[in-house]
Image (cartoon, rainbow, N blue to C red):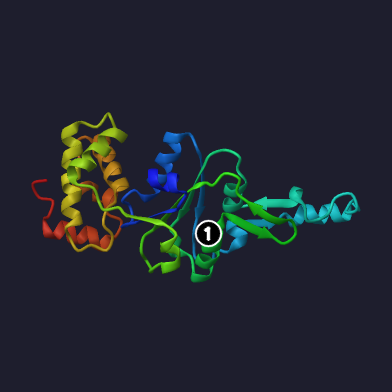
């Protein structure tokens, strides 16, 4: 994160779902006092979702009012800023989180590459907008598809793996100070066992924290009775219960 801010290069974080990639950007914004702007990528995302759009209903009212001669239809007043434009025009320190870039298509990735190269965009009706203060950019990917080399070359790269049980117990205790240390260690040891199994979806750190919360709330509940907190696929739950992997945990 220090290098990303110092060198003004985007930081590309990859890793399995749930290891805490998104939390990196949130933690940086919280620690530095910067504003967090998040662009959640999805299939079919385009510049109207990511950069800007026009407020057509207000433009239509403006047109009907007959005041176009006083103010043009395509002006700052009618511009709807999306996350990328907000980040470029922000006067304060900003952390721009581009979350799950692998869910977007190749065309959007190419557009994003252009924006991140110069931190400027062209709006045909208004001209070029260039960032006065470059945001710190964090890009996350779950590797559902391979990203293009051109994007990777412009980024610093870091792989985030699942934490060790000891480190994960520290995370649980930091987030949930009310959870006894023995309970945190027990849950983290159980999660480590689950991650050693061939499951459809392995539990992330968020599930570990939720599992500790559930066991604290229910007091006498067992790990197997609360498996639905950590595992979200029926076949995974059936497999774990049938294998006895949590016996003695």
For this view, does 29 lie left or right of residue 15? right
Q: Quick one: which residue is furthest to the front in this view?
A: 7
Position in image of residue 24 (x %, y %): 38, 45
Q: Quick one: which residue is furthest to the left in this view?
A: 248
State the residue in front, 148 or 6.
Answer: 6
Q: Is residue 106 visible?
A: yes
- Residue drawn at the location 33% of the way across and 56% of the way down: 17
Q: Is residue 105 above or below residue 181?
A: below
Tag 1: Cα neighbours inside 10 Å, few (<14), some, or many (≥20)? Answer: few
Position in image of residue 191 (x %, y %): 20, 49
Q: Quadrant of the N terminus?
A: top left
The residue that disc 1 covers is 117
State the residue in front, 65 or 126.
Answer: 126
Position in image of residue 91 (x %, y %): 61, 40
State the residue in front, 112 or 17.
Answer: 112
Q: Secondary structure at mark 1?
A: helix
- Residue drawn at the location 57% of the way across and 38% of the way down: 92
Q: Is residue 26 above or below residue 56?
A: above
């Amino acid at each position: 994160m220090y290098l990303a801010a110092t060198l003004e290069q985007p930081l590309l974080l990859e890793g399995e779902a749930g290891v805490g990639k998104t939390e990196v950007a949130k933690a940086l914004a919280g620690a530095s006092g910067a504003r967090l702007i998040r662009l959640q990528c999805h299939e079919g995302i385009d510049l109207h979702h990511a950069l800007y759009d026009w407020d057509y209903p207000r433009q239509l009212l403006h047109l009907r009012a007959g005041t176009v001669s006083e103010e043009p239809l395509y002006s700052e007043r009618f511009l709807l800023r999306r996350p990328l434009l907000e980040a470029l025009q922000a006067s304060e320190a900003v952390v721009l989180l581009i979350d799950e870039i692998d869910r977007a298509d190749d065309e959007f990735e190419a557009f994003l590459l252009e924006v991140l190269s110069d931190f400027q965009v062209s709006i045909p009706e208004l001209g070029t907008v260039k960032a006065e203060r470059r945001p710190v950019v964090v890009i996350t990917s779950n590797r559902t598809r391979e990203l293009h080399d051109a994007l990777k070359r412009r980024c610093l790269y870091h792989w985030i793996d699942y934490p060790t049980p000891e480190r994960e117990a520290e995370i649980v205790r930091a987030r949930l100070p009310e959870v006894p240390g023995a309970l945190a260690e027990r849950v983290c040891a159980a999660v480590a066992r689950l991650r050693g199994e061939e499951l459809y979806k392995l539990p992330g750190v968020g599930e570990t924290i939720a599992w500790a919360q559930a066991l604290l709330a229910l007091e006498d509940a067992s790990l197997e009775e609360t498996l639905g907190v950590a595992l979200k696929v029926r076949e995974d739950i059936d497999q774990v219960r049938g294998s006895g992997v949590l016996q003695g945990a």
